[in-house]
Amino acid sequence: MVSTNYAPEQAGIGPYATQVAEHWAADRGAEVHVLAGIPHYPSWRPDPSYRGRWRATDERSGVLVHRRRHTVPRRQTAVRRALYEASILTHGLVAPPRMGRPDAVLAQMPSLAGGVLAARIARRHAVPFVPVVQDLMGAAAAQSGITGGGRVAGAAAALEGRVLRAAALVGIIHETFRERVHALGVPDHKVRLVPNWSHVAPAGDTREETRERLGWTGRTVLLHAGNMGLKQGLEVLVEAARLHPALHVALMGDGSRRAHLTALAAGLPNVQFLPPADSGDFTDVLAAADGLVVTQRASVLDMSVPSKLTSYFMAARPVIASVAPDGGTAQEVRRSDAGWLVPPEDPAALAAAAAELAEDPAVATALGARGFDYARAHLGREAGLGRISALLDEAISEHRATAGRPVLRAPGAHPGPARPNGRKGNPS
């Protein structure tokens, strides 16, 4: 697997990449190698424990993680993002992971550099290349509001299309990505839907205790958890708090826009900034809020679906989505029937939804329960991992059939031969 983001990162695609790799290692008996970057997301600061380390190989839960250092831009612009991607690509090309011939190479994208590296490794070993599209980088450059993004969107989309067209199969996490992937030249028969799953545990019975600990008792609390970047457009939450002093807005997490948002909220006693919660406390903090907010700039349509939604549903609290009505995020909120949709970048509409939530706690509780039921029915971890594994199995089987080799049992069905490093299993 090639995934710039990996554990110990707890936000974004890192948890999904980690759970897939560990599932293959533990439950399928596979020898799994991951080419990853230095932990840095969502703070966009390198993990201090990797200071001065250019390369490292760590074993985590039976997975060999090969880390390569890269630049980490504190401020997001198109040029800085290009340098970030170029440093990932260069170091990955200069120092690829040392391993035997894999059965397949899977890439967690949005990293274009990661996609190029994964395709190159697969081509060198003549094995299937299988990208899973978590975000669409060409669309992101055009829609996210990043400085200079519009000028590089075409080039990013062209490279993205070249990478995806080289794939045996392409996984997409939401149906709204399908048309974009088609437009990049990937035929429909190569596209598979592999939605993300809820990777957090349900909340415990500590709601009132957590509210008291956080100073939320007696307040109507809207919580945003996760990355504070450009595409989120979190200014709308700060302005909603400014319009309605009775509303308490909590922003939990980190990101390139946190300092900007902190300055914007200066003098507002009803805006609170919290550090990222530990994994053991994360869902409890979500469940302690009255409403959970997902925001996106109005220009964000079909480039991404926030991974935080799967965690929000598991917390059994209503969701307020300040997003474009035709995007994938809005579709998920409608499908779950777990909250309100309000126009993006409209603080008055957001505050009005919060007031409605506070006026009828019974409705809020019912909405949260529907989100929890939706997560259990459709976003289960085992089902999500099974879809990714089925995608990989299909690519391997088709490749072996095309190459005239016998189609073997799925990886993990029987222990494989011993590898040079002494570990058993099928390498992935």
Image: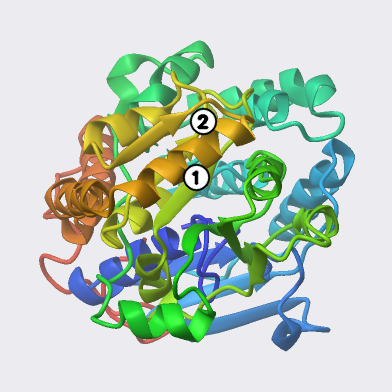
Q: Which residue shows up at 17% across the image and 74% down it?
A: 415
**Whole-number angstrom distance, CA of label 1 to CA of label 2:** 8 Å
Residue 201, compared with residue 337, is above or below; it is below
| Side of 167 where 295 appears, left or right | right
Residue position marked by numbered label 1 in the rendering: 294
Q: Which of the two discs, 1 and 2, labels the residue nearer the N terminus? A: 1
Residue 193, compared with residue 125, is above or below; it is above
- Judge by depth and name the residue closer to the eye, 251 or 214: 214
| Side of 256 where 40 appears, left or right | left
Q: Which residue shows up at 26% across the image and 59% down it?
A: 316
Tell me the amino acid under the disc marked 1. Answer: Val
Q: Which residue shows up at 34% across the image and 28% down it?
A: 331
SS label for mark 1: strand
Crowding at dot 1, Cα within 10 Å, few <14 / some 14-19 / many 20+, comes out as many
Query: Which label is found at residue 323?
Result: 2
Q: Which residue shows up at 50% across the image and 14% down it?
A: 185
Is residue 91 visible in this depiction of the protein?
yes
In contact (CB < 8 Å): disc 1 and disc 2? yes
Query: Which label is found at residue 388?
Result: none
Crowding at dot 2, Cα within 10 Å, few <14 / some 14-19 / many 20+, comes out as many
Q: State the image coordinates of residue 179 (x, y, percent, origin top left).
A: 43, 15
